[in-house]
């Protein structure tokens, strides 16, 4: 005897089959819904084209570029020698991180142009400590990173706008590091020059081997 409210097995199977067919039909209808494929013609518009032209003045998100100095490194077409935002410690540390990731393989971590791929045979780039580059406006570095120069590719798609400026700031720090004097150290930090570095590597213990 069947419990009240339950279908017999054959009836249940038939119901499941019907539901399956119904679901498949709905899914197929969704797949076949009217639509216009990319670049497909259509009679929905007078010009017969499916894809519609962009509205005049449309700018892709993140591509407004309304700040010439920030996005080009220039003002009125001339390279700038000022940063578009304050250079803080955080900016320099970000620049160091991005420089080591994208620039050091060629330029080396100190900017002398002796990176690892140069050591493996690639032509060495000009040292950042060369007089010409040391006196170039900071906008020059941003422009080269954005548009490339010589055999160097552009990095506009790999490195964000503010990160390019951060790298340029770090390059300036590298250049200063090779020519800095005590006069460049803030007065309240001069005393720190005589302090030992906490993270200085320990000197290796003298060898007592056979002398080979």
Image: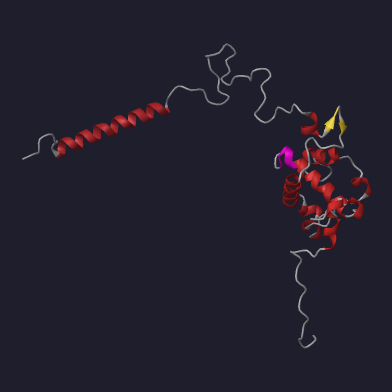
Quarter-of-image position of residue 50:
top right
Quadrant in which the C terminus appears = bottom right
Q: Nearer the viewer, residue 171 or 150?
A: 171
At which x and y percent is residue 160?
71, 39
- Quadrant including the N terminus: top left
Residue situated in front as seen by the camera: 75 or 173: 173
Left/right of residue 10 with respect to residue 123 in the rendered view:
left
Q: Residue furthest bottom?
A: 210
Regarding residue 134, the answer to whether it shows in the image is yes
Chief secondary structure of the magenta span?
Answer: helix
Tell which of 164 and 52 is nearer to you.
164
Number of numbered markers:
0
Q: In this view, does 129 lie to the left or right of 43?
A: right
Residue beneath the point at 84% across and 43% down = 150
Judged from this view, the residue extending furthest toward the right is: 131
The residue depicted at 86 percent of the width and 54 percent of the height is 177
Q: Quadrant of residue 112 in the image?
A: bottom right
Residue 183: x percent and y percent? 92, 52
Q: Which residue lies furthest to the top in this view?
A: 46
Across and down, in percent, residue 27 comes to 37, 30
The stretch in magenta equals 159-163
């Amino acid at each position: 005897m069947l419990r009240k409210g339950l279908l017999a097995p054959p009836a249940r199977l038939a119901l499941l089959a019907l539901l399956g067919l119904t679901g498949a039909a709905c899914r197929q209808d969704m797949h076949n819904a009217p639509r216009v494929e990319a670049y497909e013609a259509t009679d929905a518009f007078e010009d017969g084209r499916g894809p519609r032209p962009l509205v005049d003045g449309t700018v892709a998100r993140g591509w407004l570029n309304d700040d010439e100095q920030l996005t080009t490194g220039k003002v009125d077409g001339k390279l700038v020698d000022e940063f578009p935002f304050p250079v803080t410690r955080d900016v320099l540390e970000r620049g160091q991180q991005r420089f080591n990731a994208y620039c050091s393989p060629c330029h080396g971590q100190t900017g002398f142009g002796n990176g690892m791929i140069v050591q493996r045979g690639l032509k060495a780039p000009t040292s950042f400590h060369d007089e010409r580059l040391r006196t170039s406006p900071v906008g020059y570095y941003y422009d080269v990173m954005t548009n490339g120069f010589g055999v160097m590719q552009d990095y506009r798609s790999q490195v964000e706008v503010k990160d390019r400026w951060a790298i340029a700031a770090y390059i300036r720090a590298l250049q200063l590091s090779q020519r800095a004097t005590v006069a460049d150290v803030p007065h309240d930090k001069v005393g720190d020059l005589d302090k030992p570095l906490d993270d200085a590597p320990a000197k290796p213990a003298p060898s007592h081997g056979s002398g080979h």
